[in-house]
Image (tube, coloured by chain):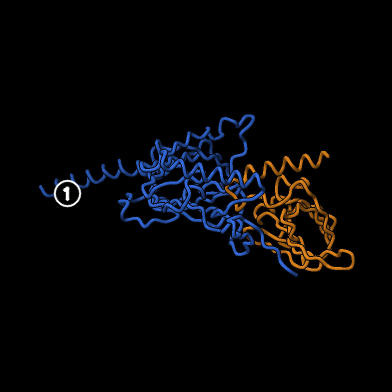
Amino acid sequence: MDLKKDLKKILYAGLALATLLPFGWAQSAKTPDFTGVWGTFKGGKGPNAKFAAPPAGQLVIKPEYAKPYEARRAKEAEANQRGEQLANSGAQCVPYGVPTMMSVAVYPVEMVQTPKQLTIVSEAFSEVRRVYLDRPQLPLDEVPPGYYGRSVGHWEGDTLVVDTIGIKTSVNGYRGMPHSEQMHITERMQLVTPDVLHDQITIDDPVVLEKPMVYTLAYQRLPNYEMVEFVCDNNREFIDEKGVVRMKVKDK
Amino acid sequence: MKSRLLNVLAMAMLLAISAQAHHSFTMFDTSKSVTLIGTVTSFEWTNPHSYIEIDVEEGGAVKHWSIEMGSPSILQQSGWKFSSLKKGDKTTLVINPLKDGRAGGFLNTATLPTGKVLGNGPGRGPAK
């Protein structure tokens, strides 16, 4: 009788293994691997045009936040007309944070993916963000506000869905947009070809935005690229008494 | 004339892509081009920008200039290396000077001691 029970147990265990294991293998075999260095996608014309990022959505800021934002943009444009640039965080070597670090000028990003974590390193300013793939998001009041916040991700088919909260308000959002502590970023990362990666970024902020801002970044794989060191230790730009960015010149 | 136009176009492109870069280039006068022939006092392969420090003889006196370039990552795409210039090298630089008149500028092209002419990152200066 006991023997029969044991056999049954072994049989069930075997069945469980037989169903679970291939599932696990299939998952890992199918899971895309973003590991590698990614530069801005340049094939927006010709046969590869279809892999270019779709146009960005509209940025609609609530009126009380839109006013100061527009005023600042107008001041910046005015200063540009005069041939001056107003102080910004980049000129002072302050990191960009999430989401801006994902697209700083022409600097590439490097992704290192393991089953439990996707690590993203931006060449500009050597910024690092970590996306945990094996745990849930925390409540907002448990995440200390910072440049990168806290990111967790899960796979939906071939798409990695990344959820980020906890970006401090001094860190600019899309195109310098303001945001509250409640800003919530959802990214959908997908290989549209083995060598083209799209990151669709949705910024939601119930306090500042009328509707979520959606835009997509397109990257192409840079197969043999070695990331260049970027330590901001020779910043000669300074902000003068008028708040304008200027360059120090060395006296002999 | 044509190269001037190309320069302006290149600058416009650079401005367009540098929206999120370290800083804009409005402090430099892109309508002016100055040629500096002198001796390198230091070549700084650094971030967020690289710099060429250069002594230029002007009517018996020596004037010192600080010339800003792109970052190493951007410069290497147009053929630059950390060792492209060193202290004591004679070089010719074509620059856009600072608008405020101080002795500084933004590099357009540099002629290395080998005779090789390098630009200031993709879209600026001669093709690779």
Residue A240, image x and y in percent? Answer: 61, 59
Q: Residue furthest front?
A: A242
Q: Residue furthest right?
A: B59
- Tell me: A13 left or right of B81: left
Whether residue B76 is visible here, answered yes or no, is no
User: Which residue occupies 38% across, 42% down?
Assistant: A205
Mark 1 neighbour class, 10 Å CA radius: few under 14, some 14 to 19, many 20 or more: few
The chain containing the residue under callout 1 comes to A
Q: Amino acid at mark 1?
A: Asp
Q: Nearer the viewer, residue A204 or A131?
A: A204
Q: Residue furthest bottom?
A: A252
Among the chains pictured, the one given blue colouring is A
Whether residue A196 is visible here, answered yes or no, is yes
Residue B28, image x and y in percent? Answer: 71, 52
Figure disc tally: 1
User: Is residue A218 depicted above or below B114 in this figure?
Assistant: above
- Tell me: A55 left or right of A27: right
Q: Nearer the viewer, residue A23 or B112?
A: B112
Among the chains pictured, the one given orange colouring is B
Indicate the quadrant where residue A27 lies. top left
